[in-house]
Amino acid sequence: MLGVYTQDLARVMDVVQRLLDTPVEERFPEKKYRLRWINDQGHYKNYLNLNSNGAWVFVDDEIDADIFAESGLEQLKKDNPRFAPAIDAMKEPAEDKND
């Protein structure tokens, strides 16, 4: 044998089991972003939100800004290819406060 001890094997198996028990979404969390409008007013930052009617609205507080997953922004760019460069320019990394 290659010098593998029972205790080492048990630790490896424990790590493997924890990995198997963890959902894929939690193992590899998706990057999240806010869409920050370029024209800030004073000390406020402007963000774009997509409301329930599908209209874009401005909010001036990071706390109120929508957080978009990377996949959501990619779909938005596919649905609106003319806006893809603007979406890329406005992406600002965000940490979801609920995580």
Image: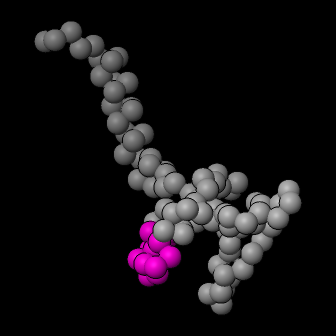
**x and y percentages locating residue 46 in the rendered image:** 75, 66
* Residue at horizontal 51 percent and vertical 63 percent from the top: 88
Q: Is residue 94 left or right of residue 70?
A: right
Above or below, 93 relative to 61: above
- Dominant SS type (magenta): helix
The one of 4 and 42 positioned closer to us in this rendering: 42
The relative height of residue 60 versus residue 3 in the rendered view (above or below) is below
| Residue 79 falls within the magenta-colored stretch | yes
- Residue 9 on the magenta span: no
Q: Nearer the viewer, residue 53 or 26?
A: 53
Residue sitting at 50 percent across and 76 percent down? 83
Magenta residues, start to end:
72-84
Q: Which residue is drawn at 34% across and 27% down?
A: 12
Q: Specify whether residue 93 is in view.
A: yes
* Residue reaching furthest to the right: 42
- Quadrant containing the N terminus in the rendered view: top left
Q: Is residue 76 visible?
A: no
